[in-house]
Image: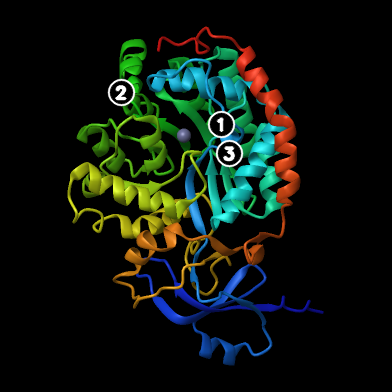
């Protein structure tokens, strides 16, 4: 006896941008799905005829996009909003030492959970259905990735998680971080939607023996997710203390491969970018975070022209990928003083994110609206007021959709946000929990004291 097929849902009354290599645009379009798979995409009139008994979800004229993919997030940072160090952080090293390396130390399992809930709720609110997270909580390393995974599974997203290995608090802690990665990677190896990778903080906080051990114990086929050349500090410390440039240290241990996620890359030379290209690794651009930290700017178009695969993330600054896209576009034009810049690379960067995510999950159509693809969709409440087609769709995204709220978010066929309201998360309860826990977290943060936290010579 076969079980009945899951019901069909038709998302209609929208303009569909299918994503994929040659993105199609359907005005008066619709998408049908059943269970966790897309059945069809096309004109609403055709799909209504084909699926007359489908349940219906109204897009209210908005733009129907593939669920957005964030290649670099820090869910743990959510409770830092409004938190200031006791004295101003005047450079990148101080931003880490006075803010992030104290906040992460002050985290408890409960505040890790609440931070993840806030970040995941925000991701859903901005149409994100797949996220790559980079976690740190030195006072509660063991089990932290499972703690986050539980939140993500309950909320309904796809995610690649890792713990950032670092010697900044001493070698035993680096080993504990490595073990947390390895345990999670092994446990989740065959999970379709929640997997692990090897997290490394950055070359300048990782000693040779730790990198050696990470490379030796890394399971076959598992990549690494690491900050690279976010600031000149990464080069200075890596070369003076460890005798090699950041990418060189990774490459000589076999850690540069097609699953290496290299975040920022602002201060790389063309030689470094060639190393990335040669190894088919991924450079991840986080423009809002770079601007916020005052660390410089990646010339995303140049990196792509030199052959690098360049994806996009938010680095914990927010969970809004379309806004990150707009920021990348504006930063490139501002930096180059060139009003023609941006159209060579950025219109395809969301598709690049999909191609990168496919390297980690057994989903050859992830990030695309096509039959048999995962039913991951979002509807941006930005009805196009002017003609839209495949050639000008990027303009509609950066000048319109990037500023609009998301009406619906659907992940693997589950409607997680419906008419702007979460269906799997209780936002009022999450915010209430955060308000109760945040003062204690901030108190622990300030109690750590004024002396430098990291033991490395920054
Ligand atoms: Zn980061």
Residue 75, numbered circle: 3
Residue 101 position within the rendered picture, expressed as x and y whole percent measured from the top left = 54, 21
Q: Are marks 1 and 2 in contact (CB under 8 Å)?
A: no
- Where is residue 39, by image quadrant? bottom right
Label 2 element class: helix
Report whether 268 appears left or right of 56.
Answer: left
Label 1 element class: loop
Residue 373 position within the rendered picture, expressed as x and y whole percent measured from the top left = 53, 68
Instruction: Measure how far apart labels 1 and 2 are at the Cα level.
Output: 27 Å
Query: Badge 1, how many Cα within 10 Å: few under 14, some, many 20+?
Result: few
Where the N terminus falls, by quadrant? bottom right
Residue shown at the point (60%, 14%) measured from the top left: 172
Residue 55 position within the rendered picture, expressed as x and y whole percent measured from the top left = 68, 80
Task: Residue 307: tell me if it is visible.
Answer: no
Report whether 392 appears left or right of 84.
Answer: left
Q: Earlier in the sequence, mark 2 or mark 3?
A: 3
Query: Badge 2, how many Cα within 10 Å: few under 14, some, many 20+?
Result: some
**Residue on which the image places disc 2:** 232
Instruction: Measure how far apart labels 1 and 3 are at the Cα level.
Output: 16 Å
Query: Badge 3, how many Cα within 10 Å: few under 14, some, many 20+?
Result: many
Label 3 element class: helix
Residue shown at the point (50%, 57%) measured from the top left: 68
Where the C terminus falls, by quadrant? top left
Report whether 364 appears left or right of 38.
Answer: left
**Residue on which the image places disc 1:** 82
- Give the camera-side residue of 54 and 249: 54
Residue shown at the point (35%, 70%) measured from the top left: 22
């Amino acid at each position: 006896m076969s079980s009945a097929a899951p019901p069909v849902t038709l998302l209609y009354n929208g303009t569909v941008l299918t994503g994929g290599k040659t993105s199609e645009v359907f005005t008066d379009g619709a998408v049908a799905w059943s269970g966790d798979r897309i059945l069809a995409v096309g004109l609403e009139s055709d799909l209504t005829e084909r699926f007359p008994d489908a349940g219906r979800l109204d897009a209210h004229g908005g733009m129907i996009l593939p669920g957005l993919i964030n290649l670099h997030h820090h869910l743990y940072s959510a409770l830092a909003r409004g938190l200031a160090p006791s004295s101003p952080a005047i450079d990148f090293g101080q931003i880490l030492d006075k803010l992030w390396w104290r906040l992460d130390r002050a985290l408890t399992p409960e505040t890790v959970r609440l931070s993840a809930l806030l970040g995941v709720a925000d991701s859903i609110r901005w149409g994100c259905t797949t996220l790559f997270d980079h976690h740190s909580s030195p006072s509660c390393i063991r089990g932290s990735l499972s703690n986050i995974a539980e939140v993500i599974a309950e909320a309904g997203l796809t995610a690649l998680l890792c713990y950032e290995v670092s010697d900044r608090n001493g070698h035993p802690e680096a080993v504990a971080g490595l073990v947390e990665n390895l345990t999670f990677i092994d446990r989740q190896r065959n999970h379709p939607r929640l997997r692990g990778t090897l997290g490394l903080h950055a070359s300048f906080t990782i000693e040779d023996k730790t990198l050696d051990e990470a490379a030796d114990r890394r399971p076959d086929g598992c990549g690494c997710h690491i900050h690279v050349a976010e600031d000149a500090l990464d080069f200075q410390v890596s070369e003076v203390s460890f005798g090699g440039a950041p990418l060189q240290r990774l490459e000589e241990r076999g850690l540069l491969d097609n699953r290496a996620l290299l975040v920022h890359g602002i201060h790389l030379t063309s030689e470094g970018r060639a190393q990335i290209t040669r190894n088919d690794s991924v450079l991840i651009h986080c423009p809002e975070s770079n601007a916020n930290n005052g660390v410089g700017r990646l010339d995303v178009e140049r990196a792509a022209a030199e052959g690098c695969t360049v994806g996009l993330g938010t680095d914990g600054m927010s969970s809004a990928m379309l806004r990150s896209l707009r920021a990348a576009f504006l930063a490139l034009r501002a930096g180059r003083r060139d009003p023609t810049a941006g159209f060579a690379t950025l219109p395809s960067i969301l598709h690049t994110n999909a191609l990168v995510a496919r390297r980690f999950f057994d989903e050859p159509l992830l990030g695309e609206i096509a039959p048999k693809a995962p039913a991951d969709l979002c509807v941006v409440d930005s009805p196009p007021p002017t003609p839209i087609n495949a050639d000008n769709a990027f303009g509609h995204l950066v000048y319109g959709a990037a500023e609009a709220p998301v009406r619906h978010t659907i992940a693997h066929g589950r409607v997680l946000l419906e008419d702007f309201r979460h269906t799997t998360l209780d936002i009022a309860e999450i915010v209430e929990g955060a308000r109760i826990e945040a003062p204690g977290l901030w108190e622990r943060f300030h109690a750590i004291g004024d002396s430098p936290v990291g033991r490395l010579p920054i």
